[in-house]
């Protein structure tokens, strides 16, 4: 039997593929250092664990409403007010099985075939494939210099087919933050041209050096139900709860209703067990995240110190997340070739920059153990600089 054309066109997630490869190699007894990971090496918040155990002990884990339990949606409303300064109601929230599903829900509801979706490179690996899955046209925009696009570079790609702009800040894979003036101009552009603006805020609390991530909502005078801004967030990164698969969207009532109908036909509802865990995490609040950020900032500084020892490496100091996106093109312009070489010859897992729309770079994470960061980066340097 012949499979669908759309399924044949969708690539495998590079990051998940490398995770699988690293785990398989470790099971074979090989000395592998995974510097390509996308999940924090921290225990989950205490209240998340307590609420999970409490729910399990009740022996009652059932379906919930499609868009999530009321208590969690109300807590997300509080979180949104506190972090974005905008008043929303539960009718503006959809709790989903991870932020990735939240993004897909949005794309499914907003994009028609041949509609264009613009996003800056480097971009998260799933953006291109998710847009294609709803028969849209992904339009990545590569910066002329550095790792951040200018507003003018984004604006130059807007046309009558543009339906949405997607922005991830702090950015995966670069760890860099788009500034307030850039966000202000993007909001103005989207409102004037009637374009959706999806803000992928999954890393917005993981920032260093007292940096602040601008809220797109702060540059709009529209209330949420008349807004074209959609915020996506979740507990995976900020609360180290990747395995619980809980994300959410904040959007207009009309769009939220459509996203709820879509989710009903795809996953019915998110896990009740995971939702009560997320409620526990949000109830514990910023104290947990601040501790994690402090440790991640120290690991970032460790990574930067090791990067400075390379002879020909170029990099920009990450301002947030737990990723760096260093330019290895002076050593090897083909990032897939270089990544494969590092795994094969010295047992170091990185993610090729080509997967993020910018070849010559490697995404190197600093969310693991500090000793693995030092040992892994040193092995890369010794391997490349000996030539």
Image (cartoon, rainbow, N blue to C red):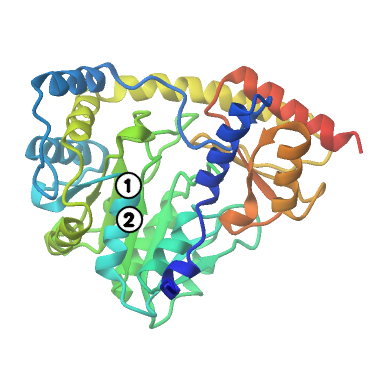
**Residue 336 shown left or right of residue 131 in the figure:** right
User: Which residue corresponds to the image point at 19% horizontal and 61% vertical from the top-left?
Assistant: 262
Q: Nearer the viewer, residue 122 or 275?
A: 275
Query: Does the residue at mark 2 contact the one at mark 1 (Cβ under 8 Å)?
Result: yes
Q: Is residue 342 visible?
A: yes
- The residue shown at (45%, 62%) is 129
Q: Is residue 42 left or right of residue 44?
A: right
Secondary structure found at label 2? helix
Determine whether the residue tagged by mark 1 lies in a helix, strand or loop: helix
**Label of residue 103 in the image:** 2
Q: Which residue is mark 1?
A: 99
Tell me which corner region of the image, top left, top right, bottom left or bottom right, holds residue 188.
bottom left
Q: Quadrant of the N terminus?
A: bottom left
Q: Using the image, determine if residue 296 lies above or below residue 127.
A: above
Looking at the image, the residue that sits furthest to the right is: 387
Q: Position of 38 compared to 349: left or right?
A: left
State whether residue 222 appears in this view: no
Q: Quadrant of the C terminus?
A: top right
* Residue situated furthest front in the rendering: 1
Q: Residues within 10 Å of mark 1 (few under 14, many from 20)?
A: many
Q: Position of residue 66 (x, y in %)?
A: 12, 50
Reply above or below: 238 against 214. Answer: above
Residue 341, x across and y down, in percent: 76, 43
Determine the residue positioned at 53% across, 41% down: 175
């Amino acid at each position: 039997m012949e499979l669908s054309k759309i399924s044949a066109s969708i690539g495998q997630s590079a990051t998940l593929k490398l995770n699988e490869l690293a785990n398989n190699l470790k099971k074979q007894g090989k000395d592998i250092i995974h510097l390509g990971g996308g999940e924090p090496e921290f225990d989950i918040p205490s209240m998340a664990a307590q609420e999970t155990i409490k729910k399990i002990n009740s022996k009652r884990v059932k379906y919930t409403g499609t868009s999530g339990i009321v208590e969690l949606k109300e807590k997300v409303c509080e979180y949104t007010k506190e972090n974005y300064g905008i008043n929303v109601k539960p009718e503006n929230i959809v709790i989903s099985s991870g932020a990735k599903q939240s993004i897909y829900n949005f794309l499914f509801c907003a994009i028609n075939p041949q509609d264009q979706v613009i996003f800056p490179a480097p971009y998260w690996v799933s953006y291109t494939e998710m847009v294609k899955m709803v028969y849209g046209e992904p339009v990545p925009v590569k910066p002329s210099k550095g790792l951040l696009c200018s507003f003018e570079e984004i604006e130059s790609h807007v046309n009558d087919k543009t339906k949405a702009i997607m922005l991830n800040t702090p950015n995966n894979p670069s760890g860099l933050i788009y500034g307030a003036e850039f966000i202000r101009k993007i909001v103005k552009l989207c409102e004037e041209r009637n374009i959706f603006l999806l803000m992928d805020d999954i890393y917005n609390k993981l920032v260093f050096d007292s940096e602040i991530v601008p809220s797109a909502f702060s540059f709009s005078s529209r209330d949420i139900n008349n807004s074209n801004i959609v915020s996506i967030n979740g507990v995976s990164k900020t609360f180290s709860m990747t395995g619980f698969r809980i994300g959410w969207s904040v959007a207009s009532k009309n769009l939220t209703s459509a996203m709820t109908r879509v989710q009903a036909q795809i996953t019915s509802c998110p896990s009740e067990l995971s939702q009560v865990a997320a409620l526990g995490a949000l109830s514990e609040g910023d104290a947990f995240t601040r501790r994690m950020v402090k440790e991640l900032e120290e690991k970032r500084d460790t990574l930067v110190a090791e990067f400075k020892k390379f002879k020909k490496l170029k990099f920009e100091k990450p301002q947030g997340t737990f990723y760096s996106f260093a330019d290895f093109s002076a050593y090897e312009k083909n990032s897939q070739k270089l990544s494969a070489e590092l795994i094969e010859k010295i047992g170091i897992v990185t993610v090729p920059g080509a997967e993020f729309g910018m070849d010559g770079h490697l995404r190197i994470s600093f969310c693991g153990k500090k000793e693995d960061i030092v040992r892994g980066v040193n092995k890369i340097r010794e391997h490349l600089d000996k030539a």
